[in-house]
Amino acid sequence: MLGSLRKSPGQLQALQRIRDWTRERFGLDADAALLVTEVACSMPGCPPLETVVAFWTEGGSRRHHFKIFKPAAEVVPDDLPYAWMKDALVVPEGFACDCC
């Protein structure tokens, strides 16, 4: 079941912080597409809330993504992957994923 689409000011601030950290960490241009969202997971062994980050480079032709297994409000800069892992975060063409 989907949660409320309304976000509290604190939630919106947390998501924006993660966007800012992601842009800085991976050297993304201001116009690069970037998605940060919090999703609920009901699968066994999955945290109840996790933060999903996706961004596109090379004019939108390369998608990168990663998950942080905690709510957005609890994410700190050290939770993001290292900058040198940027290429490892690329989603291969044709790869199907239900997270982002």
Image (cartoon, grey):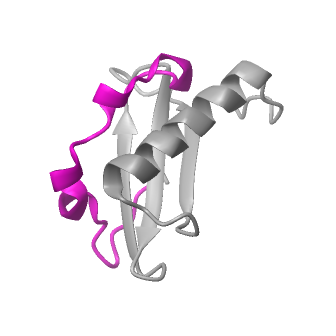
Horizontal and vertical percent position of residue 74:
47, 16
- Give the number of marks: 0
Residue at image point 54% right, 58% down: 34
Position of residue 70 relative to residue 52, above or below, is above
Q: Is residue 97 magenta?
A: yes
Residue at image point 47% right, 83% down: 59
Residue at image point 20% right, 64% down: 87
Q: Quadrant of the N terminus?
A: top right
Is 61 or 2 nearer to us in this picture? Answer: 61
Horizontal and vertical percent position of residue 58:
39, 81
Is 73 or 31 nearer to us in this picture? Answer: 31
Residue at image point 56% right, 63% down: 30
Q: Is residue 18 magenta?
A: no
Left or right: 50, with 46 as reference point: right
Horizontal and vertical percent position of residue 92:
27, 72
* Residue 56 occupies quadrant: bottom left
Residue 98 visible in image: no
Left or right: 17, with 78 as reference point: right
Is 42 or 57 nearer to us in this picture? Answer: 57
The residue range painted magenta reads 69-98
Horizontal and vertical percent position of residue 24:
40, 49
Position of residue 74 relative to residue 54, above or below, is above
Position of residue 69 relative to residue 63, above or below, is above
* Residue 97 occupies quadrant: bottom left
* Residue 81 occupies quadrant: top left
